Structure formats: structure tokens, C-alpha cells
Amino acid sequence: MARITAGVGTSHVPLLGVAADGGKDRDAYFGPIFAGYDWTREWEKGEKPDVVILVYNDHASAFDANIIPTFAIGTGERYKPADEGWGPRKVPDVIGDPDLAWHIAQSLILDEFDMTIVNEMDVDHGLTVPLTMMFGAPAAWPVKVVPLAVNVVTYPVPSGNRCWALGEAIARAVASYPEDLNVQIWGTGGMSHQLQGPRAGLINAEWDKRFMDRLIGETDELRHVPHLEYLRETGSEGIEMVMWLIMRGALGKKTRLLHRHYHVPCSNTAIGHIVLEPET
Ligand code: DHB
Ligand code: FE
């Protein structure tokens, strides 16, 4: 039986990909950011997950204003890094797991989550930067990936409660897969940031840290944080954090903290990272 053994939350700031690809990840500016991922890189070597369900958002790379799927699951064999304006990142292709992905798609849809199924798409920094942060620069990524894309760009975006419930449904889907697989689920995006307008550069460390606190243990308070609170307290792009709630929902009633990291600044944002285990 497949099982979800851990959840990882992380920001996916594109500048971190630029830093890693350009060999600047240990310089004075980026060093403290990347140092917070050292624990996780070591831990992942021991955990050796077979598959990561990687919850992320596409930033107008694979989807644009023509097609806006609320929740999309990648069922492809492989995904290429997207060209986001400076050419595709020179990182390995992302290898999918079509059998598991189709199983999850079927389970979710019969569980009344009407997923969009995507066989072919490129994946942008939302997906490739978390892989870099967790695995560095290997010749091939050490895990298969089931991409799960969430619309957090164009309103209406899904509620925190719906995201959490989707996570719960993903846990049921994985538990009903007959193959013996070690599966992790990652939630990416955030933390507080606003990239445009009069409040560009907004960072709210206090709110971000309280968000991370509430991913740990038994509370499900975050289910009920309204969009307006994310907008007001964490800037226009802070809403990406609802994707962490899909990860949290998939870990079940209670979680145990393995590692956390928070750093300001990174580009115009705060970055956060957390590693959690389901606690039964
Ligand atoms: C930036 C872009 C993102 O998608 C994000 O999540 C954080 C920061 C940026 O352009 O700096
Ligand atoms: Fe983003």
C-alpha cells in the first residue's frame, strides 16, 4: 500500500533558482536562505521518497488567461522546465508517475473533486525551485513527481477549507493505491509577498510565523482563514499559502514538527520552509 510519510512546505521564489543555477547559493545574501534547507537535504537522503505529490501554482507558463483550472493533476510521463522569459532553467526534466497520477485523479473525481487532467505541460519555478531547494543540482531528480497545480492567480481562487479537504481526499487516494510506495506531499508558494502596486514589498513576519505554528499539532484553524485576511495581512501573492493547506490536510488530524526555517528578505518576499510528519 502507498503511504504519505511526510509533508514539506516551502516558498518557491524564482530568484532562488537563479541563485542556485548561478552558483551564488552560499554567498552572503543567499547563504542564510539555503542554510535553512541543509537539514532537509540530509533528511531526504535517508527518507528516499519514491514519489512527491508536488502542489504548486503555474504562473502563466502552462496556463494563461485562456484556461484557468482550479485544481489540475499532471498525468504525464515527463515535464520540461518552462521558459519564463530567460530560457528554460537548465535542470533535469521532471519525471511523472502516470499510474499513480491516474489513480489519484480517479479517486479524487469519484470523491467529488472535479480535477482537470493534464497530460502535457511545462512546469515553472513553482515546481522546479522546490526540487532545487530539497535536492540541490543532481543529474536527475531522485523522485518521481505528480504535479498538482492550483489556481491562486486569478480570482476566484479556492478557499483554504477546500484546499484542506482536497488534501484529505489525496490521503484517501494514496492509501487506496496497491503498490508499496513512500509518498511525500509538498505544498509550495508564499510566504507573505506582494509583487505589484502601492504595497509592493509587503512582508508580515509575525503573521507568517503564526501560520507556520498552526500547521503543527492538532489545530485546524487555518481551514477558516478567509481570502481577505491573506490579502490584507500577507499581500496580494500571500494567497499562495492556501497550497500549504493541501499538504497539511493530507497529513491527517495531527502533525509533528521535524524542521522549520523562516528568513527575510529573499527578493521581495519572506521565505518559509517546514517539514512535518503525520502523527497518529
Ligand atoms: C516571486 C515570484 C513568485 O512566484 C513567488 O511565489 C515569490 C516571489 C518573485 O518574482 O520575486
Ligand atoms: Fe509564486
Image (tube, grey):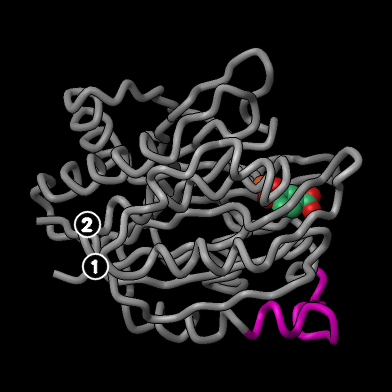
Q: Main secondary structure of the magenta part?
A: loop
Position of residue 243 measured from the top left corner of the image (x, y, whole percent): 48, 46
Please report whichever mark, 2 or 1, sits nearer to the chain's N-terminal start. 2
Task: State whether residue 26 is above or below residue 188.
Answer: below
Query: Callout 2 environment at 10 Å: few (<14), some (14 to 19), or many (20+)?
Result: some
Label annotation for residue 259: none
Badge 1 amino acid: Pro
Can residue 109 be seen here? The reply is: yes
Badge 2 amino acid: Gly
The residue indicated by pointer 1 is 278
Position of residue 142 measured from the top left corner of the image (x, y, whole percent): 43, 67
37 left or right of 109?
right
Position of residue 43 measured from the top left corner of the image (x, y, whole percent): 40, 83
Label annotation for residue 252: 2
Position of residue 117 measured from the top left corner of the image (x, y, whole percent): 39, 24
SS for callout 1? strand
Task: State whether residue 98 is above or below residue 19.
Answer: above
Query: Where the N terminus falls, by quadrant?
Result: bottom left
Q: Residue at x 48, y 25 (%)?
A: 70
- Cβ–Cβ below 8 Å for labels 2 and 1? yes
Task: State whether residue 97 is above or below residue 75.
Answer: below
Look at the image and say whether residue 58 sits in the magenta stretch: no
